[in-house]
Structure formats: structure tokens, C-alpha cells
Image (tube, rainbow, N blue to C red):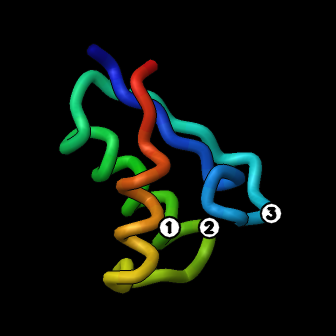
Amino acid sequence: MAKKFACKDIGMSCGFKAKAESEEELMGKIAAHAKSAHNMATIDQATLSKVKSAIKEA
């Protein structure tokens, strides 16, 4: 089943939403967005934990 994520689900004031067929594919989209929109070269462990817990079935 597809997975989805939205920045607002982890408390960000951001309209980004993504959907992918797998969590791996979704994490790639999230990482690219974090780098380009939030200037995050890497995602720290605390944020990564929030992101993973906010991923839902699409």
C-alpha cells in the first residue's frame, strides 16, 4: 500500500505533501524537500523519528 507524509503533521508551517509506493521512495522525496525547502543537508535523528511516525497509509 502507498505511503504519504505532510510537513504539517510534524508541526512545520509548510504545505509540502508527498505520496509514494514505498517508505523508501517516500523518504527520498522527504529528504530532497528538506534539503531544498528547509536547508537541511541531513535530517537529524529526532526529526527523522518524527517523520517516520507521521508517515501514514495512503
Q: Residue at x 22, y 30 (%)?
A: 22
Disc 1, SS: helix
Q: Report if the CB atoms under discs 1 and 2 are less than 8 Å apart.
A: yes
Residue 35: % across, % down: 47, 72
Q: Which mark is residue 34?
A: 1
Q: Which residue is mark 3?
A: 13
Three-letter amino acid code of the residue under disc 3:
Ser
Q: Residues within 10 Å of mark 3 (few under 14, many from 20)?
A: few
Q: Which mark is residue 37?
A: 2
Q: Residues within 10 Å of mark 1 (few under 14, many from 20)?
A: some
Q: Is residue 57 above or below residue 42?
A: above
Residue 55: % across, % down: 42, 42
Q: Is residue 54 above or below residue 33?
A: above
Which quarter of the rendering shows the C terminus? top left
Name the image quarter holding residue 26.
Answer: top left
- Nearest to the observer: residue 47 or residue 32: 47
Three-letter amino acid code of the residue under disc 2:
Ala
Q: CA distance from mark 3 to mark 2?
A: 12 Å
Please state which of the two labelled residues, at mark 1 or mark 3, is closer to the viewer.
3
Disc 3, SS: loop
Name the image quarter holding residue 21.
Answer: top left
